[in-house]
Image (cartoon, grey):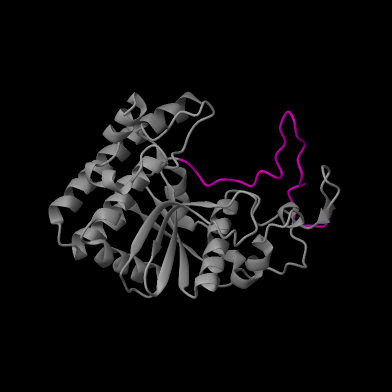
Amino acid sequence: MTLDFAAVRENLFPASHEAIGDWLTFPWHRDRTNKIQAHKVHSSQAIAIDVFGTLKMSIDRDRVLDAIARHVGVSPGGPWSIALEWTDTDRLLGEPRPTQVDALAIGSKAALIIECKFTEPGGKCSQASGSRTRQPQCNGNYIEQANPGSGVRSRCTLAGKGIRYWDYIPKVFALDPAANYAPCPFAGDAYQWMRNVVLAAAIGEHWNLKAAAVGAFADHPSFPTARKARRGLLDPSLGGQATITPISYQEIIAMACHVGLDQQLWNDLAAWVEQKIAKASLRFDSATTAN
C-alpha cells in the first residue's frame, strides 16, 4: 500500500474501509497532479465514504435506507444496495462523460441518487465560462444562440451537443423548453443539483422505480451547501414536481441511531463525523478570512 493510501485510510472511518473493494481501481477524486484527495480532512469524497461506506457494510443498511426513503418521500422496501461513485454506463442523459454519482442506493421500490458535499458549494455549468484556450460556448441565457466553436444553434449549448437534460427538465420542472429564460435558470450552482434531479428522472423511467435526488451535506453554519440547504437547494420558483431533498450527515446518523441495532457503530460514527466537521470548519473559516 502506498503512502497515499495510508493517509487515506487514516482519514476514513474504519468501518467504511471494506466498502472500497479494490483500493487501486476505486475512482478516487484527484487533483491536477493526479494525487488522491481523500486524505484531506475537508474531502467531500472521504466524508461520503465515512457515512455511506459504513452504511453499505452495516447490518442496519435496510433499516436506515428505509428511513431515508420515507424522509425524502419515496417508498421504503429492501433489500437495499449501495454503490459508491456510481457511473451511468447506460448514458441515459447522452453525456459524453456520464455523471458520476457519489452514492446510489437501490431498493425494491425506489432508487436514491445521492450528491455529497462537505465545505464546497454546488458545481456550475462550464459552458458559459471561458479559459485561456477556449472562449465561452454559451452567453449564460437559455435563448437561441450559436455556439461560437461549432456554429450549432440551440437554446442550450449542451442540448446542441446531444445532451438530454432538457428532454427531462420539462417533466420535473415547470419550465417550457420552447421559452426563453435570461439568465438560464441553471446558470449557477443550481446546475449540479439539476443534473441529479434529471438523472433521477431518467433512472426512474429506465428502471421502473420511484427515484429521488438527495443532497447529503455536512451541517455547519460556515459551509456554503449547508447555508443553501436551509433555503432550498433549488429555487422554489422553478415549480413543478422537481425536488432534491437536502439531508445532513448528522440527520442520517441520527436516523441510524433511532432505527439501527448497532448503536455503538452509529455513536462512534457520529463522534467521528462531528470531529471531522469541527476540524474542517476551522480550516474553512481560516481560508475564508485570509481571502
Dominant secondary-structure state across the stretch colored magenta: loop
x and y percentages locating residue 74 in the rendered image: 40, 73
Q: Residue at x 35, y 35 (%)?
A: 280
x and y percentages locating residue 62 in the rendered image: 27, 66
x and y percentages locating residue 276 in the rendered image: 29, 38
Q: Residue at x 57, y 49 (%)?
A: 189
x and y percentages locating residue 75 in the rendered image: 37, 75
- Observer-nearest residue: 269 or 188? 269
Q: Quadrant of the N terminus?
A: top left
Residue 41 falls left or right of residue 31: left
Magenta highlight on residue 181: no
| Camera sees residue 222 | no
Q: Is residue 201 above or below residue 280?
A: below
Q: Residue at x 74, y 56 (%)?
A: 156
- Observer-nearest residue: 266 or 27? 27
Magenta highlight on residue 132: yes
Residue 71 falls left or right of residue 141: left
Q: Is residue 38 above or below residue 211?
A: above
Q: How many marks?
A: 0
Residue 77 falls left or right of residue 33: left
Q: Is residue 109 above or below residue 38?
A: below
- The stretch of residues the image draws in magenta is 120-144
| Camera sees residue 156 | yes
